[in-house]
Amino acid sequence: MSRFPVVTGTADGSTVVELSGDIDLLTAPTVARCIDAVTRNPHPRVVLDLRPVTFMDCRGMSLLVRARRRIRERAGMLVVVTDDSRILRTMRTTGLLESFVVHSELRSALAAVSSPLRNPAASA
């Protein structure tokens, strides 16, 4: 079992949350607190970087939904960064992939979250 760090920072006026290690029952409370903190204000622009994640169970998927809901409630933007085929497959299988803007690189995710184009996380 790996220790779970959450790293947050800003880039181009957006909040970047980098999650790493396992996202599961043990680490979910830490992730939830982080999501709540970065989505507290109106119009949050958040990039959720999952590239360093080594494992994500259904609790992790629930946290993605939580982030999307909180950001939508506050008229914000959310972009997920991952190139992990396991995470993408799980998102596709559960029907979540269509609900998120997903990029494989941080640079393109930052451009997307800053774009005036409508984000599915901000849709009703």
Image (cartoon, rainbow, N blue to C red):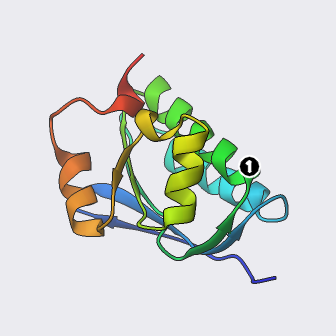
Q: Name the residue under label 1.
A: 58
Q: Which of the image's four quarters has the C terminus?
A: top left
User: Number of labelled discs?
Assistant: 1
> In the image, 116: left or right of 94?
left
Q: Please determine whether, in this image, residue 53 is positioned above or below residue 89.
A: below
Among the 4 quarters of the image, the one containing residue 25? bottom right
Query: Residue at the spot x=52%, y=77% of the render?
Result: 52
Q: Please determine whether, in this image, residue 88 is positioned above or below residue 117.
A: below
Front residue of 84/100: it is 84
Among the 4 quarters of the image, the one containing residue 66? top right
Residue 68: x percent and y percent?
50, 36
Query: Residue at the spot x=60%, y=50% of the render?
Result: 90
Regarding residue 61, the answer to whether it shows in the image is yes
Amino acid marked by disc 1? Cys
Query: Residue at the spot x=74%, y=82% of the render?
Result: 3
Mark 1 falls on what kind of element? helix
